[in-house]
Amino acid sequence: MRKYSIFATDWGKVAAVWSADGLWALSFPRASAEEALASLKTDMAGAAEAYPAWADALDRELKRYFAGEKLDFTVPVDWGGYTPFQAAVLRHTAAIPYGVVEGYGQVAKAVGSPKAARAVGGALHINRTPVVVPCHRVVGANGALVGFGGGLDRKKALLDLESVTYLDR
């Protein structure tokens, strides 16, 4: 059975859904807890409110991240439900350092499929744990802001928070 937690950040309320293996889904910050939970409705089926052991760490890390502090997230992510290719892309993306961006082609090459840049975009589109798995750090080949499920304004805001300054805007 999945569990969920709500966290308050400088950017708004964030909902997290947990499985027995770690973080299953994470919302973008929203104005209210209800909005954050509603954005994860497909992942919330049968979930009960709880505060698993990992929640304290995620709460601290989200607060620090949205306050502009450079950090690496430490909570385990549940990679279940993804194909092996999708999981490889998302694991690679999770390792892209704060303040650094990579192109879709770079990610494709890094996971052993150099001609699969579009498939990388597809894998990133279904990322259930944005920010913790920072798909906003993957950009177009020329540095352009493209392809972000959370909206390009949010992608730009996250990259601005991380002081990424060399993008072609």
Image: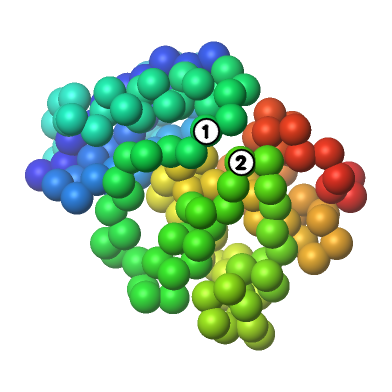
Q: For the residues marked 1 and 2, what is the alpha-carbon distance in whole angstroms? A: 7 Å
Residue flagged by tag 2: what amino acid is it?
Answer: Tyr
Mark 2 element type: loop
Asked whether residue 112 is in view, the answer is: yes
Say the numbered circle drawn on residue 71: 1
Say the numbered circle drawn on residue 98: 2
Say the numbered circle drawn on residue 95: none
In terms of image quadrants, where is residue 80? Answer: bottom left
State the residue at coordinates (35%, 67%): 82
Residue 30 position (above or below residue 72): above
Image location of residue 58, percent across then percent down: 35, 29
Using the image as rendered, state which of residue 16 and residue 31 is in the foreground.
16
Q: Do the residues labelled 1 and 2 touch (CB within 8 Å)?
A: yes
Packing grade of label 1 (10 A; few <14, some 14-19, many >=20) is: few
Mark 1 element type: loop
Residue flagged by tag 1: what amino acid is it?
Answer: Leu
Asked whether, in this view, residue 120 is left or right of residue 40, the answer is right
Image location of residue 37, percent across then percent down: 35, 30
In terms of image quadrants, where is residue 79? Answer: bottom left
Which quadrant of the figure contains the C terminus?
Answer: top right
* Upstream in sequence: badge 1 or badge 2: 1
Visual colour scheme: rainbow
Packing grade of label 2 (10 A; few <14, some 14-19, many >=20) is: many
Q: How many labels does the image show?
A: 2
Which quadrant of the figure contains the N terminus?
Answer: top left
Image location of residue 25, percent across then percent down: 35, 44
Instruction: Give the farthest residue toward the left.
Output: 1
State the residue at coordinates (62%, 22%): 68
Residue 154 position (above or below residue 76): above
Asked whether residue 151 is in view, the answer is: no
Using the image as rendered, state which of residue 132 and residue 95 is in the foreground.
95
